[in-house]
């Protein structure tokens, strides 16, 4: 799982519920800016990951499990090393 994968999954989850990321955050009882693009990287370019608290709130609000949430992430190429 990468930083981009996780953020894309949040965007896809919001879209699947016909919401923006801000709408999803509000629906989950979070500040509307929680998932804004501006929050995804620090001013120095370091990735900021959503907190487990934020993810848990979204999963509870939408009624999906972590296993279901993972399906919103892109497929990763399989390691073919033997």
Image (cartoon, rainbow, N blue to C red):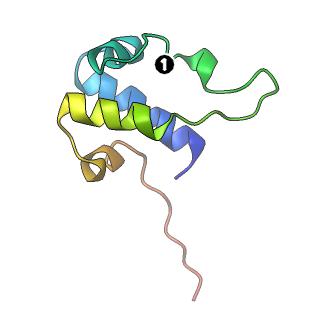
In the displayed structure, would residue 81 be above or below residue 20?
Answer: below
Residue 18, by quadrant, is top left
Point 31% across, 44% down: residue? 69
Which residue does the numbered mark 1 point to in the structure image?
A: 34
Residue 9 seen anywhere in this rendered image of the structure: no
Residue furthest out toward the right: 44
Q: Element at badge 1?
A: loop
Point 38% across, 18% down: residue? 30
Q: Is residue 22 left or right of residue 59?
A: right
Quadrant where the C terminus lies? bottom right
Point 50% across, 36% down: residue? 51
Horizontal and vertical percent for residue 73?
40, 45
Horizontal and vertical percent for residue 56?
34, 38
Horizontal and vertical percent for residue 76?
48, 57
- 29, 81: nearer the viewer: 29
Horizontal and vertical percent for residue 37?
57, 18
Residue furthest out toward the left: 63
- 53, 32: nearer the viewer: 53
């Amino acid at each position: 799982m990468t930083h981009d994968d996780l953020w894309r999954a949040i965007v896809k989850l919001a879209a699947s519920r016909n919401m923006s990321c801000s709408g999803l955050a509000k629906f989950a009882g979070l500040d509307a800016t929680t998932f804004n693009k501006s929050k995804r990287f620090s001013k120095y370019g370091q990735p900021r990951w959503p907190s487990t608290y934020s993810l848990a709130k979204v999963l509870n609000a939408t009624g999906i499990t972590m296993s279901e949430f993972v399906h919103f992430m892109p497929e990763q190429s399989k390691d073919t090393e033997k």
